[in-house]
Image: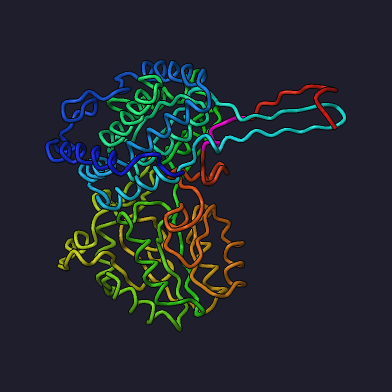
Amino acid sequence: MALTISEAEIRQVVSQVLNKVQSAPAAKDWDSTQYAGRKLIGIYEDMNDAIAAANEGYKAVRSMTVEQREKIITEIRKLTYAEAPIMAKIGVAETGMGKVEHKRLKHILVADKTPGTEDIVSNAKTGDSGLTLIEMAPFGVVGAITPSTNPSETVICNSIGMIAAGNGVVFNPHPNAIATSNYAVDLVNRASKAAGGPEVLVCSMKKPTLESAAVMQSHPLIRLLVCTGGPGVVKAVLSSGKKAIGAGAGNPPVIVDDTADIKKAGKDIIDGCTFDNNLPCIAEKEVFAFRNIADELISVMLKNGAYKIDAAQAEQLAKIVLVEKTGKDGKTRKIVNRECVGRDADVILAKIGVNVSKDIRCIICETDFNHPFVQEELMMPILPIVRVDNIDQAIEYGVKAEHGNRHTAHMHSKNIDNLSRFAKAVETTIFVKNAPSYAGIGFGGEGHTTFTIAGPTGEGITSARSFTRQRRCVMADSFRII
């Protein structure tokens, strides 16, 4: 949806925002209830209070017309577009992950391509027995858990969809991204107030915890739970006994066969893999390249900002980016080192004594299929490349590496049969052909955007209608006029 805001208005607000960015403290030193001396709206110390406030917001939005809701959403888009630079800067400062410019672009994408009230469509059925009207109604208060990888983007994207559907919302943000998430919550509330809506429409926590999440999941006023995060929190939400939408992990494979445009494929893969330092869960995580084009593909990658490490360096790096942790079951597993997630390629390479310029944006290496770089979702700009003999082996490896998450997969090919075979075999929510991964969420590709991709629960690319429930109104034996 196009923003109904003039360039002059954008320049004015951007100027104000940039002044605040320059004078604001680092996000890690920031009180999550304030920003640059301004008290943030909708932030609570107790989850019960936050839910009560969100319920009042729900009552207010429920009494609004669809047109009034859309006015709030238009204002959210306007402020998101204008304040994208500040949220991008806070996000990187607080989490240490990603790139400021890429995060700015993600906010613009959310403002431009998140569906609003136009996504809520009613249906009618008439017949000899009368008229039945089916409408998409709000759940009430939605409890949402948001990640540290796309914190403010997810808050704003979810808020637009959930408000369009007529819900109130309470967020329990990731503890490592409270400042960023709460700034976005405040933005939504400021937009609501400016558009004539309630001052508090969405709510969040000053210090979100597992305990506050548990309160949210069991509270009787919460009618729908939406979780965007890792497998642990998704599992907890799905075990709550409430209606839940779960957006879980992925490990997207890429197949490049010998019919692909190799120059385009190499650039597209690096562009997608390095966008926000590989934080998006749709990003390319491992490549299966036909043996007869692998050398050319690697050469193209090297020309597009990749740096190739050898097998010994890959083993050395694996010991740093993956660490062992013993679980409650007593079993020891390799997990991703949080200090490396979303970091720049040169920062990661420096950990093994390799010094490169900032122009290097991706670390590539050749591995076998069983290498941990292939099997684990790293969420950092490290891209393993596995040579395969044919399409059968590529599909077998790609499906296994995706681990049944059914999240996202990619392929570069001009062979329609190969593309179709992989798409059918991998069964992912998103399947991107001959483009960078971010095309799958509308960035350079068609379709709306979201940062809540619900593979486990089947909603897929969520939008406003995902946060509604069907209601049926029946007029028996009347109102059929033909």
Question: Residue 396, percent across and down?
Answer: 55, 68
* Residue 228 occupies quadrant: top left
Classify 194 as above or below 237.
above
x then y, percent, for residue 474 = 76, 23
Picture quarter with the C terminus: top right
Q: Nearer the viewer, residue 83 or 92?
A: 83
Counting from the top left corner in percent of width and height, residue 415 is at 57, 75
The part of the image, by quadrant, that contains residue 354 is bottom left
- Image coordinates of residue 178 in percent, x first then y, are 28, 33
Q: Which residues are magenta?
A: 464-469
Of all residues, the one furthest to the right in this rendering is: 128
Q: How many marks?
A: 0
| 410, 425: nearer the viewer | 410
**Which secondary structure type mostly characterizes the magenta part of the structure?**
helix
Depth check: 145 or 353 in front? 145
Query: At 69% from the left edge and 34% from the top edge, which residue is drawn?
Result: 123
Residue 386: say if magenta.
no
The image shows residue 260, relative to residue 275, as above or below, that is: below
Q: Is residue 181 left or right of residue 473?
A: left
What is the quadrant of residue 169 in the picture?
Answer: top left
Q: Residue at 54% of width from left, 75% of height from top?
A: 414
Q: Please determine whether, in this image, residue 365 is positioned above or below residue 283.
A: below
